[in-house]
Image: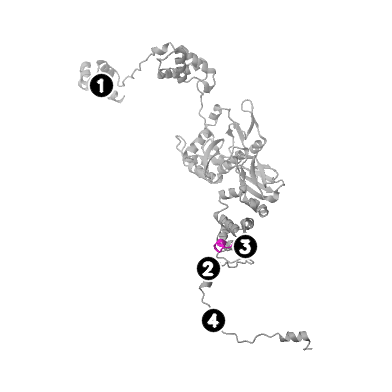
Amino acid sequence: MGSRVELFAAIRRDERVEGLSIRQLAERHKVHRRTVRQALESAVPPERKTPVRVSRRLAEFKPIIDAMLREDLDAPRKQRHTARRVLARLVDEHQAGEVSYSTVRDYVARRRPEIAIEAGKQLAAGFVPQTHAPGAEAEVDFADLWVILRGVKTKTQLFTLRLSYSGRAVHRAFPTQGQEAFLEGHVWAFEQLGGVPTVHIRYDNLKSAVSRVLVGRNRDESERWKMFQAHMGFDAFYCQPGVDGAHEKGGVEGEGGRFRRNHCVPMPKVDSIAALNDLLAAADAKDNYRRIANRTRTVGTDFAVEAPLLRPLPSSEFPTWLTLEPRVDRYARVTVRQCFYSVPAKLIGRRVRVRLGACTVTIFDGTKQVAAHERITVRGEQSLNLDHYLEVLQRKPGALSGATALVQARASGAFTQAHDAFWAAARHQLGDSKGTQALVEVLLLHRHLPAEDVIAGITAALRVESISADVVAVEARKNVHPDGPVPLGLILPRVVDLRARRAEADAEVPVELPADRRPLPSVAPYDDLLTGAGS
């Protein structure tokens, strides 16, 4: 287009300056006189006409193709004719071997929307731009988020709450989309934002909130969800089911994908869900400096306007967790959502209180917390703490070598190489049973002393070839107070390296002692007592 503009400008300039005729202008610029006349009439070159090509080979098959496309109007979306399927049927059923795929493709692409309009079908949904008042509305949704969790590719659920005015979003990862995660995600988001939207929050029909979809936007809501809304002071707005409803909360629908692409590629490598959420919180803080689309202000700037207009948080806490009361089985486990969690063996046969959170399972005996586990979601999986079985292992030491709790302790790093070395040395000197009992005594020290100090005590004991739990305890306490004053009543005897002491004894030169010239002791007075001579 640019070259024809320059050509037209040159023709008009030559005619204006030199007064050349149409023939002369055509000869100078080597164009047809028709082009010269067009340039003199207008400085804007006319658009090129696209020739209408008629496919004579396809002409006889057009009514057949139209019939196939009309059948698709009532067919399921995933079972409609593609251009390739149309061509295949033409060849098989109508011997259209000379018709090319590109010809059929172009015709189907043009006729399909025309046939839909002829049948009165809505071709495309229309949308109306929306303006949201500051602090008034928000949107919530879950999205899949894959991470490398302790070396294993794992799918987590990314909770997202996005304010409609500023675009400020809060993200939180959970193992599941359960109601505990749904409620806990709201609480976390409201705390980060410093308030609650004043009008409503938009949702699709999540099972955590909606028990049944009724006519229109009416929904049967779960009782806990109703209580949560009343406690926090907001209303829920439910979008239409399906694709149409997704457009009603398009901000959060696009936010999940944007956040994953920008902050979770490549997949995050973490050791726990808590560590993953620390990364997500840092990413949220970074997003305060981004600009949405063609806005001139950052998200953080708009949120500064919106934050004071949010409704203040309630003063009391809402229990987002679920409370259960299972019975402890003979393996010292409780069953929660078809998963198993260990408790101290002394609670076998008793009922305990379980607080089921989104990411944690906390177990109480009365008011005392007796166990805490990271929540697992795979049916039949177990989370076992080796410490809970130590009293049983004192009576049944042979069960330790194959214990599932030991396998998990090794995998988590709680049972270290130092523990294994102590166990091997104890079994070598005392035998399997006694040696395992000695190890159990050492493991009991973890209940009162930090793990690193107990490991330091084990290392010191092995260095002097001792397998005594008392020696480990002494050295562990010395590691707790390496330089400071020893607390009253804490006796720290010196552990002697026996090998070094033997070497010192071998190297010593014997000393010649002086002769003892004292008289030998006599027992004669005792003889006098026996014979009565002294009476």
x, y percent for residue 45? 31, 21
Report the magenta residues as a range: 460-467
Q: Amino acid at mark 1?
A: Arg
Question: Of circles 2 and 3, which is in front?
Answer: 2
Counting residues from the N terminus, which is met first, the one under dot 2 or under dot 3? 3
Counting residues from the N terminus, which is met first, the one under dot 4 or under dot 1? 1
* Distance in Å between CA atoms under marks 4 and 1: 132 Å
Question: Of circles 2 and 4, which is in front?
Answer: 4
* Distance in Å between CA atoms under marks 2 and 4: 25 Å
Residue drawn at the location 52% of the way across and 74% of the way down: 508
465 magenta-colored:
yes
Q: Quadrant of the N terminus?
A: top left
4 magenta-colored:
no
Counting residues from the N terminus, which is met first, the one under dot 2 or under dot 4? 2
Q: Amino acid at mark 3?
A: Asp
Counting residues from the N terminus, which is met first, the one under dot 4 or under dot 3? 3
Label ID, residue 12: 1
Q: Which residue is mark 2?
A: 500
Q: Which residue is mark 3?
A: 470
Q: Element at badge 3?
A: helix
Label ID, residue 512: 4
Q: Establish if 45 lies above or below 205.
A: above
Q: Residues within 10 Å of mark 2 (few under 14, many from 20)?
A: few
Q: Residues within 10 Å of mark 1 (few under 14, many from 20)?
A: many
Q: Element at badge 4?
A: loop
Q: Element at badge 1?
A: helix
Pointer 2 with pointer 1, Cβ within 8 A: no
* Distance in Å between CA atoms under marks 3 and 1: 108 Å
